[in-house]
Image (tube, grey):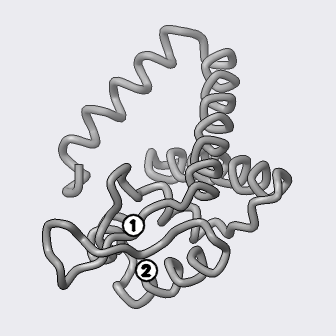
Amino acid sequence: MDLATLMFISYRAMDERVVTAMQDAGFDITPAQARLAQRISDGGSRLTDLARQAQVTKQTASVLVAALEVKGVVERVPDPQDGRARLIRFTPAGRAAARRAQVIVARVEREWAEHLGPELTAGLREALTVLREVTDPYR
């Protein structure tokens, strides 16, 4: 199996665990909404930046943000840098959801580290970090 497929399988396993745990905790969020929400910066993000980082169209990002707004997870506020632009930022409920997701991610990473051992875990993190330097235009 090629490396990209192996990475994708692990990514989807993490994705599934996080979304399922979020839903079990009462946060009604879809995988697509979660993938977009995980890219929202602490100070808020512009829709175009979220779309680019999530590798979706601006229209798709807009639909996902609108659904998150209806659920009370995010809000759109004026961008202090540009009065014409809007920022998407977490509401207090959204911040609570993001913190919950971070706890779940940390738990899964600990499970993986226990399975792999410290050397393989460190090597995997290092290899993926180096690979990101040449593959991620948004880092």
User: What's under tag 2, amino acid-wise?
Assistant: Ala
Q: Residue at x 59, y 66 (%)?
A: 73
Instruction: Please count the marks in the image.
Output: 2
Residues tagged 2 and 1 counted as in contact (Cβ below 8 A): yes
Q: Secondary structure at mark 1?
A: helix
* Marks 2 and 1, how far apart at CA: 8 Å
Which of 119/64 is in front?
Answer: 64
Indicate the position of residue 24 as horizontal and vertical percent values.
85, 53
- Quadrant of res 33: bottom right
Vertical arrangement, residue 39 with respect to residue 117, above or below: below
| Label placed on residue 96 | none
Indicate the position of residue 91 as horizontal and vertical percent values.
54, 61
| Label placed on residue 54 | 1
Mark 2 or 1: the one toward you: 2
Q: Secondary structure at mark 2?
A: helix
Residue at mark 2:
61
Of the numbered discs 2 and 1, the one sitting upstream in the chain is 1
Q: Residue at x 73, y 47 (%)?
A: 17
Pointer 2 local density, CA inside 10 Å: few below 14, some 14–19, many at least 20: many
- Relative horizontal placement of residue 84, taking residue 32 as reference (left or right): left
Indicate the position of residue 22 as horizontal and vertical percent values.
74, 53
**What residue occupies the far bottom of the structure in this picture?**
59
- Relative horizontal placement of residue 11, taking residue 112 as reference (left or right): left
Which of 105/73 is in front?
Answer: 73
